Amino acid sequence: MSEDVKQSLKLFIVLSRAHKAITEQTNQFFQAHGVNPTEFAVLELLYHKGQQPLQKIGGKILLASGSITYVIDKLEKRGFITRVNCPTDRRVTYAAISPEGKEFMSEIFPEHEKNLHELTNALTSEEKDQAIELMKKLGLSIKDLSY
């Protein structure tokens, strides 16, 4: 195995372990607040971007469209979101965050941001910028590959 191949394997392992560590911590935070990561992602999208067509939510939070209905149903039962019919197209239904959902997110989102900051605090501001640029470059280059 060439040194380049070994280095690529090591990069994959390091990225995977870093992702796993951050994901485990954030999942514990979500669980402590009574939501799962997908429910939080939907609430965060609606909280920051406003109502969204149900058909588009899966793509925006990287979730299979079949699972979205289940998540939306659970959040609606909890009173965190409402469904809104599109006035111009009967085929389209929007999910909108409810006042209860806004209140919930306004309480936990600042804490989530603080936790993420603490989790990434081993890096300087400049290193974070570098990591962001490198991960974007890597992600975009992979999108262009086809197998």
Image: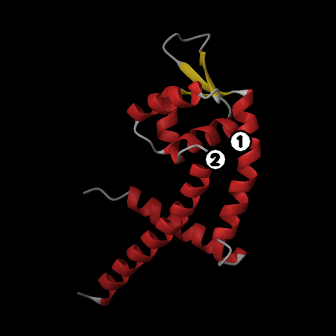
Quarter of the picture holding the C terminus: bottom left
* Residue 124 in the image, given as x and y percentages of width and height: 70, 78
* Residue 62 in the image, given as x and y percentages of width and height: 46, 45
Is mark 2 in CB contact (under 8 Å) with mark 1?
no
Amino acid at circle 1: Met
Quarter of the picture holding the N terminus: bottom left
Q: Secondary structure at mark 1?
A: helix
Task: Give the residue at mark 2.
Answer: 33
Q: Residue at x 49, y 33 (%)?
A: 71
Which numbered mark, 2 or 1, is in the foreground of this view?
2
Q: Residue at x 58, y 72 (%)?
A: 131
Is 7 positioned to the left or the right of 79 in the image?
left
Is 39 positioned to the left or the right of 65 in the image?
right
In this rendered view, identify the residue nearer to me: 87 or 78.
78
Instruction: Decide which of tag 2 and tag 1 comes sooner along the chain.
Output: 2
Tag 1: Cα neighbours inside 10 Å, few (<14), some, or many (≥20)?
A: many
Q: Residue at x 43, y 69 (%)?
A: 16
* Residue 27 in the image, given as x and y percentages of width and height: 54, 55
Q: Colour scheme of this structure image?
A: secondary structure
Q: Residue furthest bottom?
A: 3
Residue 107 vs 143, above or below: the answer is: above
Quarter of the image where one finds residue 81: top right
In this rendered view, identify the residue nearer to me: 66 or 1.
66
Q: Residue at x 75, y 28 (%)?
A: 99
Task: Give the residue at mark 1.
Answer: 105
Amino acid at circle 2: His
* Residue 138 in the image, given as x and y percentages of width and height: 46, 66
Q: Which mark is residue 87?
A: none
In this rendered view, identify the residue nearer to me: 54 or 27.
27
Residue 76 vs 10, above or below: the answer is: above
Q: Secondary structure at mark 2?
A: loop
Q: CA distance from mark 2 to mark 1?
A: 10 Å
